Image (cartoon, rainbow, N blue to C red):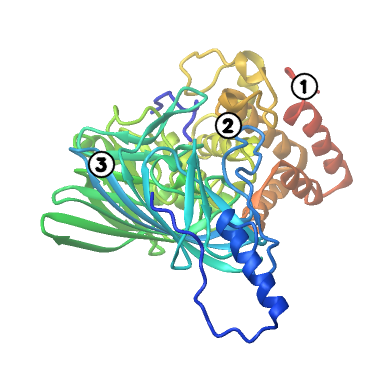
């Protein structure tokens, strides 16, 4: 997410389970037990089965510290296949979600997160499944229990007018209506407004999205465009994302975008989609993408995805930038610092993804510190000067005199509640933690740590404890290790403004 946090612009059919009847050569006692079991199954779906009857429902949330109902237990999603159709005039979305997942326990039922929209049918492994709705939960009961370790496919057909969600911090997310289409933004909970899934960053998956819109509009998503076809006045755009992606950085943007594709010197595709009226203002900024990526690779290690680019929406379409995977979304033409921030998230947040929303500072602290490093390497203020200014009087190089005393409101690793995970301490004090590590270990060890971190946890999830242990292990000398251990108590977890030595 962009500097300053969100909200600020900075430049039902039901089917009972059944089995096919076969010639039964079992003993009378076994047949009687099976009949009893089947009758019980008809009375209470999933209560008993001929394969053991020990399946249990998956949890209806992963008990995230700030969003306990987000995500679900009992399975890991491997792939989302989303087939969407959108009519901007009617604001009507139709969708089919094919979700390939692996059961992590024997399941009699499992949940998906879906807010609003009408579900018309659900199948699991090709068989009709019972389902019910309760708030943001879509509970599915397969015809047969799913064995632990079994890979299965669930298909959900749905439609309706997708919602715009106002989050705990007051920002709008979900499905945002724009002048000529729509923009889907998901951090932290908005993606459940437009497709069913396991909507917690701890469960990443690959994606294929097909979006059909009226001819003349473009539909842009993550990854690479694999197909564009027009038939009967409607155009379908197919996008493929092979690398794992958390659902909160999945996106769809529908509108009259101007599309441009270039490549870096290494051949990495850069795909930009720019809203009408933003092309002229964005052209100079977006031309820096390849150079920024080259600089970030030098600092953070190899770029972790197979394409890059941008979605430049209208200024009134969203109140904040977001690090949508491979293709960050900007509210109007971005400046260089904002691009540095959102592209840095491709390493910190999108590739190395937090296990819980309490670990948000690992995303925003690193992305903010990337701006400081970029200033330092491009004839601006040094990271040390920026740190000192923030510590002494709260001044910050792009804040235009904004009072930054709020950076001491809470420690980066302990936001006070769900509404504070995008607040200043997570960004700016988070970046100060990163700088304190650099001071403690020296530049050589610091860059080894940063690049080793992105390499070790590439396309994985990590939390604050993983990070502190990694830094301690690679700090170098015993003296440096003692220094970084002191940083955790004072800067990362400590209340109030730490004392400077």
Compared with 29, 147 (above or below) is above
> Residue 206's spot in the image, x, y percent?
48, 60
> Residue 288's spot in the image, x, y percent?
36, 45
Mark 3 sits on what residue? 92
Left or right relative to 26: residue 198: left
In the image, which is nearer the foreground, mark 1 or mark 3?
3
Q: Secondary structure at mark 1?
A: loop
Left or right relative to 64: residue 239: left
Residue 458 visible (yes or no): no
Q: Secondary structure at mark 3?
A: strand
Compared with 431, 257 (above or below) is below
Q: Do residues under tags 1 and 2 come within 8 Å of each other at their CB atoms?
A: no
Residue at (22%, 44%) from the top-left corner?
Answer: 257
Compared with 159, 306 (above or below) is below
Q: How far apart are the two marked residues, 1 and 3, measured between alpha carbons?
A: 56 Å
Q: Residues within 10 Å of mark 1 (few under 14, many from 20)?
A: few
Disc nearer the start of the sequence (1/2): 2
Q: Residues within 10 Å of mark 2 (few under 14, many from 20)?
A: some
Q: Secondary structure at mark 2?
A: loop
Mark 1 sits on what residue? 500
Q: How far apart are the two marked residues, 2 and 3, measured between alpha carbons?
A: 50 Å
Residue at (36%, 41%) from the top-left corner?
Answer: 117
> Which label belongs to residue 224?
none
Residue at (66%, 39%) from the top-left corner?
Answer: 63
Mark 2 sits on what residue? 382
Disc nearer the start of the sequence (1/3): 3
Q: In terms of image quadrants, where is residue 432?
A: top right
Disc nearer the start of the sequence (2/3): 3
């Amino acid at each position: 997410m962009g500097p300053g946090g969100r909200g600020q612009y900075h430049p039902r059919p039901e089917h009972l389970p059944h089995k096919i009847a076969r010639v039964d050569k079992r003993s009378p006692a076994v047949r009687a037990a099976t009949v009893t079991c089947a009758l019980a199954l008809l009375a209470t779906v999933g209560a008993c089965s001929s394969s053991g009857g020990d399946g249990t429902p998956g949890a209806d949330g992963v008990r995230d510290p700030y969003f306990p109902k987000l995500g679900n237990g009992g399975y890991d999603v491997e792939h989302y296949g989303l087939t969407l159709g959108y009519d901007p005039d009617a604001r009507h979305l139709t969708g089919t979600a094919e979700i390939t997942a692996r059961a992590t326990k024997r399941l009699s039922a499992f949940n998906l997160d879906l807010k609003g929209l009408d579900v018309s049918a659900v199948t699991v492994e090709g068989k009709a499944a019972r389902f019910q709705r309760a708030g943001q939960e879509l509970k599915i009961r397969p015809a047969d229990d799913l064995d632990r370790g079994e890979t299965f496919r669930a298909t959900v057909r749905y439609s309706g007018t997708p919602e715009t969600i106002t989050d705990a911090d007051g920002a709008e997310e979900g499905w945002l209506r724009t002048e000529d289409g729509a923009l889907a933004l998901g951090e932290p909970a908005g993606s459940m407004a437009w497709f069913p899934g396991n909507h917690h960053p701890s469960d990443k998956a690959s994606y294929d999205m097909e979006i059909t819109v009226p001819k003349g509009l473009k539909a842009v998503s993550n990854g690479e465009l694999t197909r564009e076809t027009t038939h009967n006045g409607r155009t379908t755009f197919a996008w493929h994302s092979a690398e794992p992606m958390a659902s909160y950085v999945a996106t769809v943007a529908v509108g009259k975008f101007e599309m441009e594709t270039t490549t870096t010197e290494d051949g990495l595709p850069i795909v930009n989609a720019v809203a009408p009226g933003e092309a002229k203002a964005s052209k100079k900024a977006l031309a820096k993408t390849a150079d920024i990526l080259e600089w970030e690779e030098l600092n953070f290690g190899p770029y972790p995805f197979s394409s890059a680019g941008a979605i430049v929406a209208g200024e009134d379409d969203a109140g904040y930038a977001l690090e949508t995977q491979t293709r960050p979304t900007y509210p109007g033409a971005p400046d260089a610092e904002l691009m540095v921030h959102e592209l840095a998230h491709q390493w910190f947040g999108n590739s190395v993804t937090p296990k819980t929303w309490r670990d948000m500072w690992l995303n925003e602290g690193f992305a903010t510190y990337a701006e400081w490093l970029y200033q330092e390497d491009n004839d601006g203020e040094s990271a040390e000067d920026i740190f000192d200014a923030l510590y002494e009087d709260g001044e910050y190089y792009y804040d235009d005199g904004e009072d930054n005393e709020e950076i001491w409101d809470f420690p980066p690793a302990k936001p006070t509640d769900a509404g504070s995970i995008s607040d200043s301490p997570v960004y700016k004090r988070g970046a100060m933690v990163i700088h304190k590590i650099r001071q403690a270990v020296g530049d050589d060890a610091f860059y080894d740590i940063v690049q080793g971190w992105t390499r070790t946890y590439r396309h994985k999830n990590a939390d604050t404890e993983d990070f502190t242990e990694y830094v301690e292990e690679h700090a170098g000398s015993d003296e440096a290790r003692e220094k970084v251990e002191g940083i955790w108590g004072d800067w990362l977890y400590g209340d109030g403004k730490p004392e400077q030595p």
